[in-house]
Amino acid sequence: MNQISATRARISYVLKLIVFLSATIGTFLSAYAGRHSFMGGRVVFMYFTIQSNLAIAVICLIGAILMQRRRAVSQGWYVIQFVGTVSITLTGVVFGFVLAPTLGADAWNTQNTLTHLVVPLVAVVDYFVSAYDANMKGRNVFWVIVPPLLYAIYAGIGYVRGWQFAEGIRYPYFFLNWGSPAGAFGFSRELPLMGSAWWILLLLLFLVVVGFVYWFIANAIAKKFSR
């Protein structure tokens, strides 16, 4: 169990509220947007972006409640927070470097800014404020592949069953389009450039790398403040 200092608790409490409010407002605005907009309408809940935002919002809300009640936090809870933080990092990075360039000027509207920029950045900062000394074992880093892997399976089932992620589109993101010219393991000169299986493997590898980077940074901060 771990009880963080009063100052860190206050800072983390504010950060958690920012994450919760930003994710909630961003999700509402996305759901309120028309079905014909990117991730607009009720289908927003089919996207990893919104699912990861809701997950980190719930994690931060529970964390804030635990802090308010001055409850000690278990190692298992820190692993959950870590996994949620890395997942929301994936949301921000994929949107910023993969999806936004294909969407043009409309990419950074209010809801996208909240769910793809504000929430990921604040969630990461909060993790290093509240959990840098959690002494999490390195093997726990590999839990970060679980949410995106489950989502890839979910999206694959949706593709096979013909779910509509947008009007006339059976996949949530272009790199999960199993029917593209690149297919599963092929390559092409147009998007998605390589098959969906390669994209999934690349993103899972990216998550593990990010996970270990966060783990090393947290350990470095803990050593610095323990002196």
Image (tube, rainbow, N blue to C red):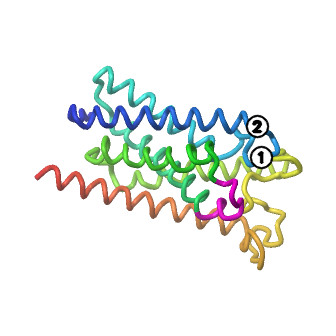
* Magenta highlight: main SS: helix
Rendered residue at 37%/56% (across/down): 214
190 horizontally vs 220: left or right: right
Which residue position holds label 2?
Answer: 41
In this rendering, the answer to whether 173 lies above or below 36 is: below
The answer to whether residue 101 is magenta is: yes
Query: Residue 23: percent from the left, percent from the top?
Result: 55, 37
Identify the residue at the far left of this view: 227
The answer to whether residue 85 is magenta is: no
In this rendering, the answer to whether 8 lies above or below 116 is: above
Disc 1 residue type? Ser
158 horizontally vs 131: left or right: right
Q: Nearer the viewer, residue 46 or 157?
A: 46
Give the label on residue 127, or none: none
Which residue position holds label 1?
Answer: 37
Query: Residue 35: percent from the left, percent from the top?
Result: 81, 41
Identify the residue at the far top of this view: 69
Rendered residue at 58%/33% (across/down): 25
Q: Disc 2 and disc 1: Cα gap in Å?
A: 8 Å
Identify the residue at the far front of this view: 105
Disc 2 residue type? Gly
Query: Residue 17: percent from the left, percent from the top?
Result: 43, 32
In this rendering, the answer to whether 24 lies above or below 121 is: above
- Badges 2 and 1: C-beta atoms under 8 Å apart? yes
| Residue range highlighted in magenta | 97-107
45 horizontally vs 169: left or right: left
Q: Nearer the viewer, residue 155 or 118?
A: 118
Query: Residue 58: percent from the left, percent from the top?
Result: 50, 32
- For label 1, the SS is loop
Q: How many marks?
A: 2
